[in-house]
């Protein structure tokens, strides 16, 4: 058994058999309505993987988080700023002992979630603006190419 598998199994023992992103409701676009082609595809996407918070660090409970395959792929597509904030939230969550509720840790965790929500909103706004700009220029390119074709025929 590899070091990632050992760390993953230890995380499962400590925090349960659930993806951190799903458990903490950190993904803004819900995947509840996603349709899978087969049960195998659904099972594969929900399989838990070990995520390195610091890619150069060791495979350990302190440096890892449990993510489903699908959420791990989503995580890797996020900006470095969002990834950093998510890793901070994972760390705060791991500090919160389920048996002993520490209000200071929970308060830190909740504050991180609020900051994360703000960052995600800003990132989504930036993406939407970039998409509008890209679409605008694409439509102008199409119009210009149409006029060039008309000029060529004259």
Image (cartoon, grey):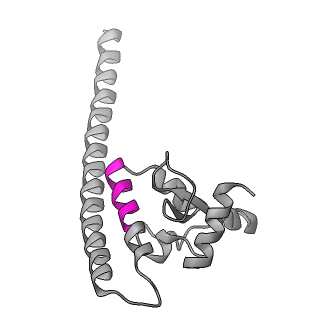
- Quadrant of the image for the N terminus? bottom right
Instruction: Specify whether residue 88 is painted magenta.
Output: yes
Vertical comparison of 77 with 121: above or below = above
Q: Quadrant of residue 46?
A: bottom right
Magenta stretch bounds:
80-89
- Quick one: 83 or 61, which is closer to the camera? 61
Q: Quadrant of residue 87?
A: bottom left
**Residue 40 appearing in the image:** yes
- Quadrant of the image for the C terminus? top left
How far from the left and from the top, in percent, is residue 2? 71, 55
- Quick one: 103 or 86, which is closer to the camera? 103
How far from the left and from the top, in percent, is residue 79? 36, 49
Q: Please give the name of the residue rendered at 40% of the width and 80% of the height, measured from the top-left corner.
A: 96
Q: Left or right: 145 with respect to 42?
A: left
How far from the left and from the top, in percent, is residue 7? 62, 63
- Quick one: 23 or 143, which is closer to the camera? 23
How many numbered marks does the figure carry? 0
Q: Quadrant of residue 24?
A: bottom left
- Quick one: 12 or 73, which is closer to the camera? 12
Vertical comparison of 112 with 74: above or below = below
**Secondary structure mostly seen in the magenta stretch:** helix
**Residue 27 appearing in the image:** no
């Amino acid at each position: 058994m590899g070091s990632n598998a050992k760390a993953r199994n230890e995380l499962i023992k400590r925090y349960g058999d659930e993806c951190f992103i799903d458990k903490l409701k950190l993904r803004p676009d819900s995947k509840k309505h996603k349709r899978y082609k087969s049960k195998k595809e659904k099972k594969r996407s929900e399989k838990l993987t070990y995520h390195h918070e610091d890619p150069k660090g060791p495979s350990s409970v302190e440096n890892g988080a449990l993510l489903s395959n699908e959420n791990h792929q989503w995580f890797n597509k996020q900006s470095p700023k969002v990834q950093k904030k998510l890793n901070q939230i994972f760390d705060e969550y791991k500090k919160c002992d389920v048996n002993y509720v520490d209000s200071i840790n929970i308060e830190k965790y909740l504050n991180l979630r609020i900051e994360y929500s703000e960052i995600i909103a800003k990132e989504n706004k930036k993406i939407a603006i970039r998409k509008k700009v890209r679409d605008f220029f694409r439509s102008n390119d199409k119009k210009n190419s149409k006029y060039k074709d008309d000029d060529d025929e004259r």
